[in-house]
Image (cartoon, rainbow, N blue to C red):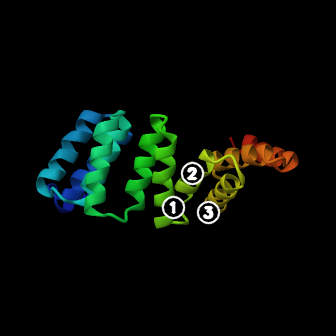
Amino acid sequence: CRELAGRDANHVLTHVCMGRAFLVWRRSSLAFEHIDRALVIAPDDYEARLALADARRIQGDLVGGQEAYARALAVRPNSADANHGLGLLYLGFGKFAEARASFRKALDLDPEDPDTQLELGRLDSGPEGLRLVEAALANRPGWPEAMLAVGTARTRAGNAAGGEEMLRAFLKRS
């Protein structure tokens, strides 16, 4: 963010970057300050809209998050990131059917995204779920969350040896 601020402290992406940084630092009031500034500068900027939606999700605001993701998707209808975020929002509220639908759309838009593969795969206990969590691990080798999901999915699928092998690898790594 410092590099962006050095070039233009009042640029929309400078404020988006700062807003996201404050979210990571769990300083939501400062995050919303910067996101609001970004939206004043460029009300229809996709990155600012997505940052607001993600902030609402992190805040645990179902209705605000849904509205914010809808606005981000209005700006960029084919956004895998916005659909993925919406899936995470629904997942956090136990709305599994809605989460599946959002993750499915995100995966259709970006079939190689390991984050979406993992989330959608964990929601499906059948063969497709196993295929998706294995794809997530293949796309991000050594990823502990995917290793755990693969080990669990293999065990559920009746492959106890393959599941145990992956779970042992997960325990060594984590």
Amino acid at dot 3: Asn
Q: Is residue 124 left or right of residue 11?
A: right
> Neighbour class for label 2 at 10 Å: few (<14), some, many (≥20)?
many
Amino acid at dot 2: Leu
Q: Is residue 93 left or right of residue 2?
A: right
**Contact between labelled residues 3 and 2, with CB atoms less than 8 Å apart:** no
Residue at 57 percent of width and 51 percent of height: 120
Q: How many marks?
A: 3
Residue at 80 percent of width and 44 percent of height: 155
Choose mark 3 or mark 1, whichever is in front.
Answer: 1
Cα distance in 3D space between marks 3 and 1? 13 Å
Q: Nearer the viewer, residue 1 or 163?
A: 163
Residue 140, position as x, y percentages in the image: 61, 59
The residue at which mark 2 appears reads as: 120
Residue 116, position as x, y percentages in the image: 53, 55
The circle drawn on residue 107 is: 1
**Contact between labelled residues 1 and 2, with CB atoms less than 8 Å apart:** yes
Choose mark 2 or mark 3, whichever is in front.
Answer: 2
Cα distance in 3D space between marks 2 and 1? 9 Å
Mark 3, secondary structure of its residue: helix
Of the image marks 2 and 1, the number of the one nearer the N terminus: 1
Residue 18, position as x, y percentages in the image: 27, 48
Q: Is residue 141 left or right of residue 52?
A: right
Mark 2, secondary structure of its residue: helix
The residue at which mark 3 appears reads as: 139
